[in-house]
Image (cartoon, rainbow, N blue to C red):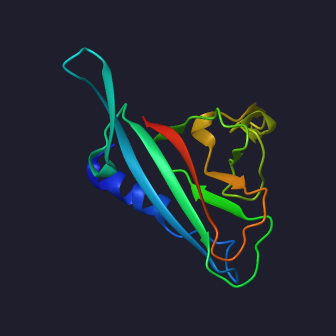
């Protein structure tokens, strides 16, 4: 993917998501590239760098920090992120829900079928994912915060 298009995709992924209107939840999103190098002893060393120069094959790490800045507890918080085009998610997190239709329906990838151009259906594949979501199971008290992270690979 060209770097200009990639930066636009990253900006879209970091844009504030709807669904939190009326709640005093602050979201802070960051994207890093994980680089692996070898130290002088021959061991792998992992570092995180800015994702502004991510390229094909790079491992991305998305970090979402959330905080209740209101004066009431929040229950059932759903943290939603758009998936940048040209990335493939690591779907190993069992708490991660996905959507293949812009957030209208949620579940595991294996739950979804999509129409084909010839009138049939096919199973959804990772490239079809448009959004990811996690539901925070515990109540978030005023001033309380949390973090979640997930991985994707640039195609």
| Residue plotted at (76% across, 72% down) | 74
Q: Residue at x 55, y 43 (%)?
A: 150
Decide if residue 95 is in sight here.
Answer: yes
Horizontal side, residue 53 vs residue 80: left or right: left
Q: Compared to 152, does 85 lie above or below? A: below
Image quarter (top left, top right, bottom left or bottom right) of the C terminus: top left
Does 98 appear above or below 75?
above
Q: Can see residue 84? A: no
Q: As drawn, is 46 to the left or to the right of 106?
A: left
Specify the quadrant of the image occupied by residue 25.
Answer: bottom right
Q: Can you say whether 103 is above or below 53 in the image?
A: below
Residue at 70 percent across and 58 percent down: it is 103
- Place of residue 101 in the rendered image (x, y in percent of width and height, measured from the top left): 69, 53
Asked whether 125 or 135 is in front, the reply is 135
- Position of 14 with respect to 37 (left or right) is right
User: Image quarter for residue 96?
Assistant: top right
Give me the residue at 78% from left, 65% from top. Answer: 139
Which residue is most to the left?
Answer: 40
Instruction: Count the labels in the image.
Output: 0
Judge from the rendering whether residue 149 lies leftward or rightward of residue 139; answer left or right.
left
Find residue 39 and report its horizontal and vertical position in percent.
23, 23
Q: Depth check: 99 or 137 in front? A: 137
- Asked which quadrant contains residue 64, the reply is bottom right
x%, y% of residue 140?
72, 68
Q: Give the quarter of the figure containing the N terminus.
A: top left
């Amino acid at each position: 993917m060209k770097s200009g298009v990639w930066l636009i995709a990253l900006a879209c992924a970091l844009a504030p998501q709807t669904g939190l209107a009326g709640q005093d939840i602050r979201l802070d999103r960051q994207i890093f590239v994980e680089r692996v190098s070898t130290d002088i002893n021959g061991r792998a060393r992992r570092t995180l760098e800015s994702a502004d120069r991510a390229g094909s094959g790079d491992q991305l790490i998305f970090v979402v920090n959330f905080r209740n800045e209101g004066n009431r507890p929040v229950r059932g918080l759903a943290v939603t992120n758009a998936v940048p085009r040209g990335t493939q998610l690591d779907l190993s997190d069992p708490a991660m829900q996905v959507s293949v239709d812009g957030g209208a329906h949620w579940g595991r990838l294996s739950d979804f079928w999509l129409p084909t151009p010839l009138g049939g259906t096919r199973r959804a594949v990772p490239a079809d994912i448009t959004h990811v979501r996690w539901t925070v199971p515990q109540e978030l008290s005023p001033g309380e915060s949390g973090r979640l992270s997930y991985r994707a690979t640039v195609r």
